[in-house]
Image (cartoon, grey):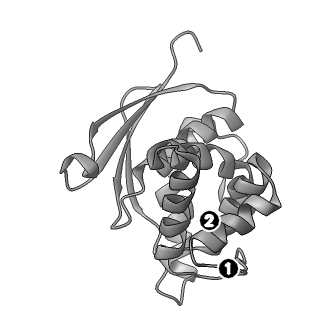
Amino acid sequence: MHGIVLKGLKDFVVDSYDRDTWQTLQREAELPHRLYVPVTEYPDEDVLTLVETASRLTDLPVPDLLESFGRFIVPPLVETYGIHVDADWTGLELIANVETYIHLALRAKQISTYTPPELEAEWRGTDTVSVVYRSDRQLCHLARGIINGVGDYFDEPYVIEEPRCMHAGDDHCELVVSRAPGV
């Protein structure tokens, strides 16, 4: 898992609760005193264990935690990868172009085993983008949160339908993202 995600998770917990809660979470997840640097790669299990532990400690379902975290992490992601974002894009255009302009650039620069999820985006009219998400991590709830976070960032509320989901036995997730009515 890319370090920016784990650093973002720490920031999310500290911002939502406090630093002591982050340290408690690390200790309960048996990952005490681990530092997460944005430009470093970490085992996927770190983020999965931290999220599962946070769910247990807060009684919040993992999908809800992942979606909230996804919304939270958008501003730092845009700040970090903004060089790949056209200044004239809308939020939907960013969503439609993540794979082409950001994930492919990340894969091209990687000399490690880090792999972002595979996304296929297709426009369906002028106000709807279908995003096919594939990843062994099955973090489609995080993807949904990131999509809503892009909507927050661009002040474009979205409606998201998910006709296919890996958690329901499908081989991929499909997130159909539309501008909310009246926007």
Check disc 2 and report its element: helix, strand or loop: helix
Frontmost of labels 1 and 2 is 1
Q: CA distance from mark 1 to mark 2?
A: 18 Å
Instruction: Examine the rendered structure and indicate whether residue 149 appears above or below residue 25.
Output: above
Give the image location of residue 141, x and y in percent.
44, 47
Mark sitting on residue 133: none
- Disc 2 designates what residue? 5
Give the image location of residue 183, x and y in percent.
59, 15
Tell me what residue is drawn at x 59 percent, y 82 percent. 41
Q: Nearer the viewer, residue 6 or 143?
A: 6
In this view, the residue farthest toward the top is: 182
- Mark 2 crowdedness (10 Å alpha carbons): few <14, some 14-19, many ≥20: many
Tell me what residue is drawn at x 81 percent, y 61 percent. 19
Check disc 1 and report its element: helix, strand or loop: loop
- Disc 1 designates what residue? 32
**Type of amino acid under label 1:** Pro
